[in-house]
Amino acid sequence: MATRLYLCVFLLLLIAFQSTMIKATIVLPSPLCRPVLASTKENFQFALNLHIYKAELFLRSTVGRGINDISPGLVDGPAPIGATLANIDDRTKKVVEESGLASIGHIRAIVDMLFLKTPLPVPQLDLSPQVYAKFFDAINLTLKPPFNTYANTNSFLFAAVYASDFLKLFYAGIMSSIVGNPERELAAGIALYEAASYGVFRSLLNDRANLTVSPYTFTVGNGTNFTAQVANQLGGCGLKDEGLSVPLPLGAENRTTTNVIAADVNSLIYTRTAREILRIVFITGNATSPGGLFPHGFQGTLYQRILALKQN
Ligand SMILES: *[C@@H]1O[C@H](CO)[C@@H](O)[C@H](O)[C@H]1NC(C)=O
Ligand SMILES: *[C@@H]1O[C@H](CO)[C@@H](O)[C@H](O)[C@H]1NC(C)=O
Ligand SMILES: *[C@@H]1O[C@H](CO)[C@@H](O)[C@H](O)[C@H]1NC(C)=O
Ligand SMILES: *[C@@H]1O[C@H](CO)[C@@H](O)[C@H](O)[C@H]1NC(C)=O
Ligand SMILES: *[C@@H]1O[C@H](CO)[C@@H](O)[C@H](O)[C@H]1NC(C)=O
Ligand SMILES: *[C@@H]1O[C@H](CO)[C@@H](O)[C@H](O)[C@H]1NC(C)=O
């Protein structure tokens, strides 16, 4: 009895002591925002879907070729629906092509690390302009004519930022749970690349912030605000994407409204779980209801588990 009492007092003191030491309260994420447990291999396999998406979008829109045309035997499966060349300027085109080629290297590095069998089965992708138009419907922004991401450089850069952003947010989220030194090095190498890629495309958008997104009257700056709202609404876990210009309380150190790199209160990169990513790329706001860019869902056991556990 007495030992129990001492134990209780000790625990109470410990709690009191800790609460003076730890200023930040630990807030459990809401059920919608909790990650589904996944192994290192499963997380990389999940990411492969996003790498394949980025490679196919970037290469088919710039050079009209897919992953298998450039690296025969790496992947296998249905060709993306609706892929088309984008009407973009030459400088942007070269940068997009470079980043698309880099994605092939990232896919190969993951395959090698995990000893995956090639050709890798690809998810069905839908890259048609109508799918990108659907993102705007999510915030009831009915554009006339419907948004065509391939129409010009300004419109295409939104898709380019999204592709890099998904990868950056996902890797930032899994980094601390990666097991094994070579695996951590690989994840860091890819995450840093994707953060750089995101920065490059955001910077290109920033140079164009005051230009209109033809044929509409809104500016590129407004457009970044719309696409951020879309991602935040579909993701369902708060503000993690931001426009190029924000109110002061969201700017770095609350001292600027310039916001080329979206980041948290200490300017750290935001994270998104697999479920949040699925809700956005499916454009359904539901991780178990495929659609949008991935009409038949993702490849890999993490996605299968999310379905089985009904973790929408
Ligand atoms: C969009 O419109 C639908 C139907 O009118 C409404 O239920 C929904 O709340 C609207 N969403 C936003 C973000 O305004
Ligand atoms: C866009 O317009 C704002 C307000 O006039 C200005 O501060 C900013 O420098 C402009 N940006 C570019 C890239 O021209
Ligand atoms: C576009 O951005 C400008 C400058 O931030 C703002 O004044 C304007 O209201 C925005 N327009 C739309 C349609 O959001
Ligand atoms: C969009 O722009 C408005 C007005 O400038 C701002 O208050 C809001 O925070 C922006 N939203 C995002 C997601 O950047
Ligand atoms: C900036 O504002 C936010 C809330 O608006 C606050 O939590 C944060 O401490 C502020 N940061 C600085 C450096 O003042
Ligand atoms: C999510 O999608 C699944 C499969 O279509 C459906 O059964 C479920 O009701 C949806 N959940 C929500 C909250 O919409």
Image (tube, grey):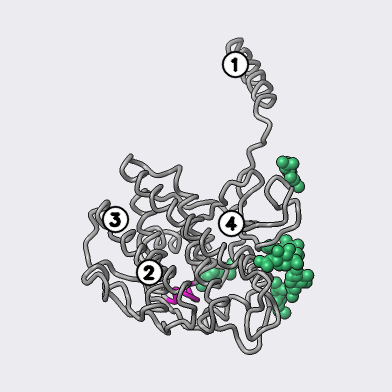
Residue 55: assigned label:
2
Question: In the image, which residues are magenta?
Answer: 290-295
- Which residue is depicted at the point 30% across and 55% down? 110
- Would you name the residue on which mark 4 appears? 32
- Would you name the residue on which mark 1 appears? 7
Crowd rating for badge 4 (residues with CA inside 10 Å; few <14, some 14–19, many 20+): some
Q: Looking at the image, is mark 3 or mark 4 earlier in the sequence?
A: 4
Crowd rating for badge 3 (residues with CA inside 10 Å; few <14, some 14–19, many 20+): some
**Amino acid type, mark 3:** Ala
| The image quarter in which residue 24 lies | top right
Q: Looking at the image, is mark 1 or mark 2 earlier in the sequence?
A: 1
- Would you name the residue on which mark 3 appears? 109
Q: Nearer the viewer, residue 287 or 255?
A: 255
Q: Looking at the image, is mark 2 or mark 3 earlier in the sequence?
A: 2
The answer to whether residue 74 is left or right of residue 217 is left
Assign a secondary structure to mark 1. Answer: helix
Can residue 293 be seen?
yes
Q: Looking at the image, is mark 3 or mark 1 earlier in the sequence?
A: 1
**Amino acid type, mark 1:** Leu
